[in-house]
Image (spheres, helix red, strand yellow):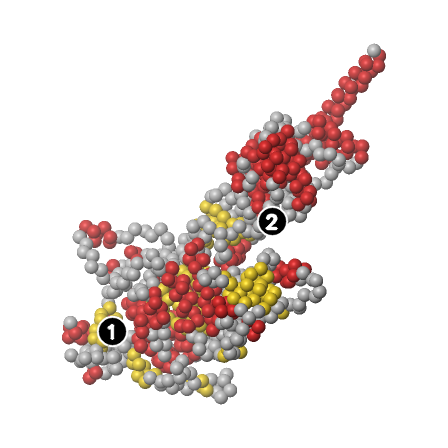
């Protein structure tokens, strides 16, 4: 009896002592505990995601892969799997599991090391959000106290959600939704029971138990959790047996992008970094761009196909590598597959190694160890050898003339279903497409493939535009009193140039011919270099530089000499496209932009683009084009005061009449000039201009209708020539056509209205002056009202001669 009383007293004293100890520790530690209420407003490190305008994911940037979900979106089956793995009594306890804690504490006191676990999910939340990972008695007390406070401040669903979204699960995945994407390429709601159990087993040892780094340990942990789920009544025996028998299919999945638009996504990353610093990577911004998902894919395909077509014309350069033959019984998996694994897929061109060569085909090995063949007639016979940019060798007689065993090559599957020998083009290309009325970037491609080169040739490359620049010279001339019918002599020009060895610059037309007196319309249509130089001589270099500065171009690096007429300065493809947007929209300056809006992690819009936007209704009535619409007096009065535009109006920088005339000339480029290949599009509303520089080293085509403006460029990064038979119309125009065929599919063919102050009169095509009555070869030409030319007897000049304009118009009409 005395022993029992002694034991009872000891127990009571022990209980009181433990209570006093706990109270003392609480009083000591509680003032320094963090405020658990901050968990309600916790910001998880969440990567930035970049979307097209219609919501397709094209980029993800951040140190941690994370996709937070609310509790309501977490599958119940996974909730049960995690409870079975970590804390079966989670929804019943108040933050701590006494039995588990006593066991863990006793082991820590007796051994100084942590043995079995005693942490509840709530305690793990306390540790993950507030504490370090050191294994000490004091940290454990802090963890317990914080767990109690967390249970007081938050409900169970909120605590579970915090754990679900924060825990590290290997391979840079934080949170279970991100882990589902990394390991299975699916949302957690799409996974089955076995996969849920596999994920639930990772937190205990993320490096050892994840299904990629530790498939055996991971499966053992998975099977144990499935058994616990059965024992706890979450699943029945049949479900358990089926899940146990299921092989795991986890593989590493990268960013689950809708399609490749890496150049656009990288531009967004750079702009977001400028705006928000390193927070751009961690604060969960969702960036919606102006990119059209469908047209972006068309643009990429157009650039790739255009480069492959160019490359085919210039011959096969040989395999990327020549691997040594296999020795003895060495298997390909031990040598060739290693080489294939280290070779990236570029623009859908797959690497393969030739394993056999015979008379009709070659056998090939892919990186996934599958095998196939490339037929001679369908896929190899075209591969004449490259000699130079101007020459190819003789057509090969058989596969052995082209390939050998061990060659690492590129192949692509064509529409005929067969593999074809190909190669990564050495040339590069870029495409920029804008919405003319506000500068929204619809599509942008900065090269053959981001995997090959991250250098963005659409924005970073500075190349000579060549004749692509001529429309702006001719526009400046028209605003200075020249007309589309003004005559300039197409004859040799010799200019002193001390930078040249002979001290003289003797420019030529592309054909090397001279055509004599030429109307400006025809000179621009046929891209006559010598007329352009003489026109700039008469206009003045400074006047042209002042004029093009209106378009937002940086003229500080433009040459201040006559070579400017031939586009010898450098511009980016983006700059060219933006300048052509002014030609497309009727004469307004816009600024290209890519980010349409930015949402924060809570889905709130924190930025919305307000681009300069064409507002034709904001112009004075006298500046608007004539229309056939008849208005009542009430309607006229109602329209007299236009509504305040929602967006800042784009400034007008071109006389609308000059814009109309230049547009009509650039339409002639399509119908009669260097862009005639575009007639295949069968559209009457497109206009554009080719461009080719000396060498030729750069090939351009820029063109538009009122809805879309697009510029394309082709060239070598190292400034080597494209080949003497390559021009803007052969290398760049086909890319533009392939893209615009789809971009204009839903765009109506709407003729441009004639602006006030434009007249159309019959002229003599040889003199540019008014035609004689009844002249058989007379043609119509547009003029600014004040610049209508006189008749031959009255002379000619940049403006009208002889009679006053009003008197001439009375005679004409």
Across and down, in percent, residue 248 comes to 61, 44
Please tell me whether mark 1 or mark 2 is closer to you in this view.
Answer: 2
Q: SS for tag 2?
A: loop
> From where the camera sits, is residue 748 visible?
yes
Above or below, 111 against 630 in this view is above
Quadrant location of the N terminus in the rendered image: top right
Q: Residue at x 76, y 23 (%)?
A: 17
Q: Which residue is mark 1?
A: 781
Q: Which residue is mark 2?
A: 251
Question: Residue lying farthest bottom?
Answer: 502
Across and down, in percent, residue 567 comes to 43, 75
Across and down, in percent, residue 602 comes to 50, 42
The image quadrant of residue 469 is: bottom left
Above or below, 623 against 480 in this view is above
Residues under labels 1 and 2: Cα distance?
67 Å
Tell me if 335 is positioned left or right of 373 in this view: right
Q: As rendered, which of 619 and 72 lies closer to the eye?
A: 72
Above or below, 766 against 295 in this view is below
Tell me if 663 is positioned left or right of 242 in this view: left
Q: Residue at x 44, y 77 (%)?
A: 725
Q: Residue at x 67, y 28 (%)?
A: 97
């Amino acid at each position: 009896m005395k022993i029992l009383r002694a034991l009872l007293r000891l127990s009571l004293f022990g209980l009181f002592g433990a209570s006093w100890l706990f109270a003392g520790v609480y009083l000591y530690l509680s003032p320094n505990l963090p405020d658990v209420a901050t968990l309600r407003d916790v910001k998880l490190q969440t990567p930035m995601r970049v979307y097209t305008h219609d919501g397709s994911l094209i980029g993800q940037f951040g140190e941690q892969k994370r996709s937070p979900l609310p509790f309501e979106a977490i599958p119940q089956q996974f909730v049960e799997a995690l409870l079975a793995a970590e804390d079966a009594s989670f929804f019943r306890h108040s933050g701590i599991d006494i039995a588990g804690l006593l066991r863990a504490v006793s082991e820590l006191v007796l051994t100084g090391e942590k043995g079995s676990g005693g942490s509840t999910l709530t305690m793990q939340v306390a540790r993950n959000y507030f504490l370090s990972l050191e294994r000490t008695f004091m940290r454990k007390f802090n963890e317990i106290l914080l767990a109690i406070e967390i249970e007081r401040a938050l409900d169970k669903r909120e605590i579970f959600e915090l754990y679900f979204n924060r825990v590290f699960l290997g391979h840079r995945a934080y949170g279970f939704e991100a882990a589902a994407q990394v390991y299975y390429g699916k949302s957690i709601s799409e996974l089955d029971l076995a996969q849920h159990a596999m994920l639930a087993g990772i937190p205990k040892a993320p490096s050892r138990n994840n299904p990629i780094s530790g498939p055996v340990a991971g499966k053992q942990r998975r099977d144990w959790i499935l058994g616990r789920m059965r024992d706890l009544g979450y699943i029945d025996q049949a479900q358990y047996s089926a899940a146990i028998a299921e092989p795991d299919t986890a593989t590493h999945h990268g960013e689950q992008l809708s399609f490749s638009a890496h150049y656009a996504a990288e531009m967004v990353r750079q702009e977001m970094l400028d705006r928000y610093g390193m927070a751009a990577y961690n604060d969960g911004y969702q960036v919606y761009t102006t990119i059209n998902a469908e047209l972006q894919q068309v643009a990429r395909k157009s650039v790739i196909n255009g480069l492959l077509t160019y490359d085919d014309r210039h011959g096969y350069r040989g395999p990327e590598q020549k691997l040594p033959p296999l020795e003895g019984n060495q298997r390909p998996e031990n040598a060739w597959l290693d080489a294939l694994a280290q070779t990236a897929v570029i623009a859908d061109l797959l690497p393969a190694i030739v394993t056999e060569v015979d008379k009709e085909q070659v056998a090939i090995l892919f990186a996934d160890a599958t095998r196939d063949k490339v037929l001679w007639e369908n896929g190899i016979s075209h591969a004449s050898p490259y000699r130079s940019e101007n020459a190819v060798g003789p057509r090969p007689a058989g596969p052995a003339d082209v390939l050998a065993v061990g060659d690492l090559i590129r192949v692509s599957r064509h529409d005929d279903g067969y593999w074809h020998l190909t190669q990564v083009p050495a040339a590069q290309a870029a495409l920029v497409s804008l919405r003319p009325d506000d500068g929204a970037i619809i599509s942008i491609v900065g090269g053959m493939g981001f995997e090959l080169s991250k250098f963005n040739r659409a924005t970073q490359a500075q190349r000579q535009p060549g004749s692509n620049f001529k429309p702006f010279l001719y526009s400046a001339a028209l605003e200075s009193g020249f007309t589309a019918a003004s005559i300039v002599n197409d004859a040799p020009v010799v200019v002193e140039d001390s930078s040249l060895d002979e001290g003289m610059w003797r420019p030529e037309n592309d054909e090397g011919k001279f055509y004599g007196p030429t109307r400006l319309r025809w000179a621009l249509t046929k891209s006559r270099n010598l007329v352009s130089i003489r026109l700039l001589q008469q206009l003045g270099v400074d006047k042209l530089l002042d004029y093009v500065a209106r378009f937002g171009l940086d003229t500080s690096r433009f040459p201040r000499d006559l070579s400017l007429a031939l586009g010898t300065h450098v511009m980016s493809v983006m700059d060219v496209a933006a300048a052509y947007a002014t030609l497309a929209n009727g004469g307004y300056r816009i600024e290209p932009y890519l980010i349409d809006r930015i949402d924060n992690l809570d889905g709130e819009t924190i930025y919305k683009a307000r681009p300069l936007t064409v507002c034709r209704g904001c112009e004075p009535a006298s500046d608007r084009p004539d229309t056939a619409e008849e208005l009542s007096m009430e309607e006229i009065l109602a329209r007299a005061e236009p509504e305040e535009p929602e967006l800042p109006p784009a400034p007008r920088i071109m006389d609308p009449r000059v814009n109309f005339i230049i547009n009509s000339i650039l339409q002639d480029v399509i119908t009669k000039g260097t862009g005639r290949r575009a007639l295949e599009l069968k559209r009457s509303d497109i206009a554009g201009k080719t461009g080719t520089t000396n060498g030729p080293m750069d090939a351009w085509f820029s063109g538009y209708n009122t809805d879309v403006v697009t510029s394309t460029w082709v060239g070598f990064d190292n400034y080597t020539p494209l080949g003497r038979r390559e021009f803007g119309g052969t290398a760049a125009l086909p890319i533009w056509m392939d893209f615009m065929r789809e971009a204009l599919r839903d765009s109506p063919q709407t003729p441009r209205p004639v602006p006030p102050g434009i007249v159309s009169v019959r002229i003599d095509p040889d003199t540019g002056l008014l035609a004689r009555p009844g002249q058989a070869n007379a043609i119509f030409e547009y003029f600014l009202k004040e610049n209508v030319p006189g008749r031959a007897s009255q002379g000619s000049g940049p403006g009208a001669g002889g009679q006053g304009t009003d008197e001439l118009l009375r005679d004409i009409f």
